[in-house]
Amino acid sequence: MTEVAGRDDRRRGAQRGRIDKRAAILDAAFTVFAREGYAQACVNQIAAEAGVAKPTVYNHLTDKANLFRHAIRAAHDGLLRENLATVARLADPGTDLRQTLLAVGRDLARTGADERTWALRRLLHAEAARFPELLDDAVDQDVRRLTEALADRFARLALGGRLHLTDPTVAAEQFLALVDGPLESRSRYGTRPVTAADQEQIANAAVQTFIAAFG
């Protein structure tokens, strides 16, 4: 029995090690693609960035195109998880809804202004013709999931009488647009940093407008 348990532990450890190594390769791939662009990036660079041998990269992801697809997907998944966790704070907004909305807007702005987020957007735009499916998988689906999550929170707040709205999805789309639109213009579509002060100002303006419309 002990021998069987030991084999199971070793198997689980090997599986965890493989998952961790794959994650490291995908993170390194994203870093290299963001720095070099898809055309100039090579598997040798990705392997060196990940600290693994080149054959290891091929064993996990087979080729550069597959590396790109999975690296973009992994980066987008991380961004979505962060934004969903931010929106989840509205499940218990406390007594001061305005301050909670402001905290949510501030965190969405911080995530949206992050260099990794802009690198992701630049890669998607640059390679849209080569990888059109990524716009459906990594953009449309994730935007829809975030909007649905926010709409659900707004609908619950409306049922509790804390917001006045007829279409929670429209309200969610407008709140996200109030944050994302100014980020794009102030950053010149990701070509220059958006300061913490600017992020705060964007969040304040977004919440002020949102509360005026739906508060």
Image: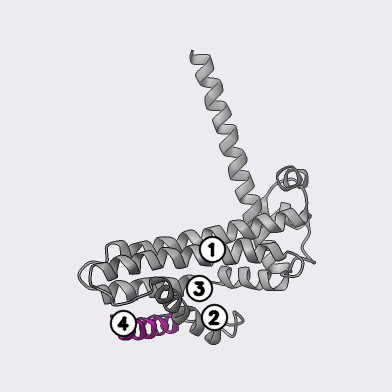
- Residue at the spot of label 1: 142
Instruction: State how far apart marks 4 and 3 are (Cα).
Output: 21 Å
Q: Earlier in the sequence, mark 4 or mark 3?
A: 3
> Tag 1, which secondary structure?
helix
Residue at 77% from the left image edge and 63% from the top image edge: 41
- Taking the magenta stretch, the answer to whether it contains residue 200 is yes
- Give amino acid for label 3: Gly
- Residue at the spot of label 3: 112
Residue closer to the observer: 207 or 31: 207
- Give amino acid for label 4: Ile
Residue 110 coordinates in the image, percent (x, y): 45, 73
Residue at 60% from the left image edge and 49% from the top image edge: 23
Q: Earlier in the sequence, mark 2 or mark 3?
A: 3
Q: Nearer the viewer, mark 2 or mark 3?
A: 3
Residue at 65% from the left image edge and 57% from the top image edge: 71
Vertical order, 99 against 42 (above or below): below
Tell me where residue 15 sits by quadrant.
top right
- Residue at the spot of label 4: 211
Q: Disc 1, disc 4: CB below 8 Å?
A: no
Name the residue at the front extreme: 166
Vertical order, 204 against 114 (above or below): below
Tell me where residue 165 sits by quadrant.
bottom left
Instruction: State how far apart marks 2 and 3 are (Cα).
Output: 11 Å
- Taking the magenta stretch, the answer to whether it contains residue 170 is no
Residue 145 coordinates in the image, percent (x, y): 49, 62
Report whether 66 appears left or right of 115: right
Residue 212 coordinates in the image, percent (x, y): 31, 86
Q: Earlier in the sequence, mark 1 or mark 4?
A: 1
